[in-house]
Image (cartoon, coloured by chain):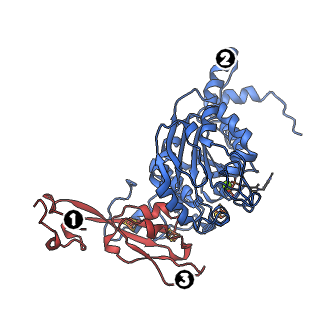
Amino acid sequence: MNPKREVIGQTSIRSKVHPVPFAPPRGEGPPPVADEHPLAAYLRMDRIPHIWCPTCGIGIAVKCLAEALDVLQLDTNKVAVVSGIGCTGRVAGYMKLDGFHSTHGRAIPFATGLKLGRPELKVVVFSGDGDLSGIGGNHFIHAARRNMDLMVVLVNNFIYGMTGGQNAPTTPVTAKTSTMPFGNFEHPFNLPALAAGCGADYVARWTTLHVRRLTRSFKEALNRRGFRFIEVIAPCSTLYARLNKLGTGYDLMEFYHNNTEIKNGADPQTVDIGFQGKIICGRFVDSERPTYLDMMKQHYTKVLGDKFVPMPEEGGLIWPPGEKPTTPAAKATAEVREPEEVTHG
Amino acid sequence: MKYWRKPLDYEQIEIPHGEVHIIAERCKGCVFCVEYCPKHVLVMSEDFNAKGYHYPQALKQGECVNCNLCEMICPEFAIFSSSLPNGKLGQVAEVNPDEVTLTKGG
Ligand SMILES: Cc1ncc(C[n+]2csc(CCOP(=O)(O)OP(=O)(O)O)c2C)c(N)n1
Ligand code: SF4
Ligand code: SF4
Ligand code: SF4
Ligand SMILES: [Mg+2]
């Protein structure tokens, strides 16, 4: 449980609206509402209620990420969330973090650029199965191969939710979708095996029923470097459950309750999911390879020596217009860059 | 809760007490909180909120143990729990020490 939920008097609602590092200063924005949700500070509450259908699981995954940020007490100015397109793609717009709602499948390339330009940020990619493993599949495998410093949360509802239930690269064989009305006959991806095979440093899978374990995985992944992949199996009540006559999202949660098996350290090759088959959850990969940024720094230091000016770890490149950079590393970078005439277009 | 024998530290054990808060207008009636609350504190209301969904109501508020599960599992940010001062196990309303069965092993 959240350690901050300490006992303060009889009606402790206010104590739950605890100060968070980025709460708006007094005079700016409304004061916290007494009976507002304790994680409201991590969400754009003016946009809540969100657009997700009743019993959709995406909101639970968002909640678990907010909880992980809260427990870790991370400086939220140093966390960014990037999404693609789809129901899950809306996440970047609902979280009160710097974020970007990129084009379809392009969350990882955007996040890669962000991480390279602002290495001090923790960059979280939060998107759907179709977005990250369909149209964005190539970006996914290459980011994993490079061990790019990204935390990738993929909400797998086995279908393209937003566009009306088309077949996804994750749809299990025989499951019905709007483009496979007689049932799917394509082999789906086993995503943990794909990520692990490409070289991801951290690979885990949970369902939206495993709220505490999912939160723990988010916490672990937020504190690590390299390519971290967390697959969240989530109900899509409106399309996946309806087209397959599986009931509501609650029935899917009950299905997860009865048909998941936790096997930490399981071989990712063995965790593929059949239609209404057993879902193996757990943390499958937990290794430490040099990350993309490590490799780049090491290599350029070796071949370029002093000529290589690494991006300052504290992100010293951002300074107010007209002012001079302050940190020595930022000064050095500015000196290197200034003589170059940059022509746009 | 029934015990097959009265625990030796029955008077000392403290159990967390919580209070559950429901933001009814935000609820979309998914029933996750009602179904997964380990203490069966919640029931779905007969009434509808403005959006036309049934929302949960705390039927047995005094039994909430602030486990936070309803809050964790709600996709709508519509329910949360907060802590009240811990109570002695012997003071919890639902546990009547007279009802504790002392037959087996005791
Ligand atoms: C280039 C492009 N192609 C197609 C689309 C249409 N489109 C929008 S969302 C989506 C699928 C999203 O599926 P998924 O990532 O699984 O998200 P979900 O809605 O299931 O959360 C598609 C194909 C688009 N927006 N842009
Ligand atoms: S269509 Fe499916 S994935 Fe999209 S919000 Fe509705 S239930 Fe969720
Ligand atoms: S905090 Fe736990 S015991 Fe209390 S209402 Fe929520 S789920 Fe039930
Ligand atoms: S979990 Fe949230 S949305 Fe679902 S019934 Fe409970 S309060 Fe309503
Ligand atoms: Mg999907």
Cα separation, mark 3 vs mark 2, equals: 69 Å
Looking at the rendered structure, whether the residues under marks 3 and 2 are on a common chain is answered as no
Instruction: Tell me the tag on residue B89.
Output: 1
Q: Disc 3 designates what residue?
A: B48
Q: Amino acid at mark 1?
A: Leu
Q: Which residue is mark 2?
A: A306
Q: Tag 1's secondary structure?
A: helix
Label 1 or label 3, whichever comes before in sequence order: 3
Q: Do the dots labelled 1 and 3 sit on one chain?
A: yes
Q: Is residue A322 visible?
A: no
Q: Chain of mark 1?
A: B
Q: Residue furthest bottom?
A: B47
Left or right, residue A286 beside residue B41: right
Chain under disc 3: B
SS class, disc 2: helix
Q: What residue is drawn where x is 13% and y is 58%?
A: B8
User: Who's blue, chain-wise?
Assistant: A
Residue A196 horizontal/vertical position (percent)? 59, 35
In the rendered image of this protein, which colour is used for chain B?
A: red
Q: Pick whichever, A134 or A220, lies toward us.
A: A134
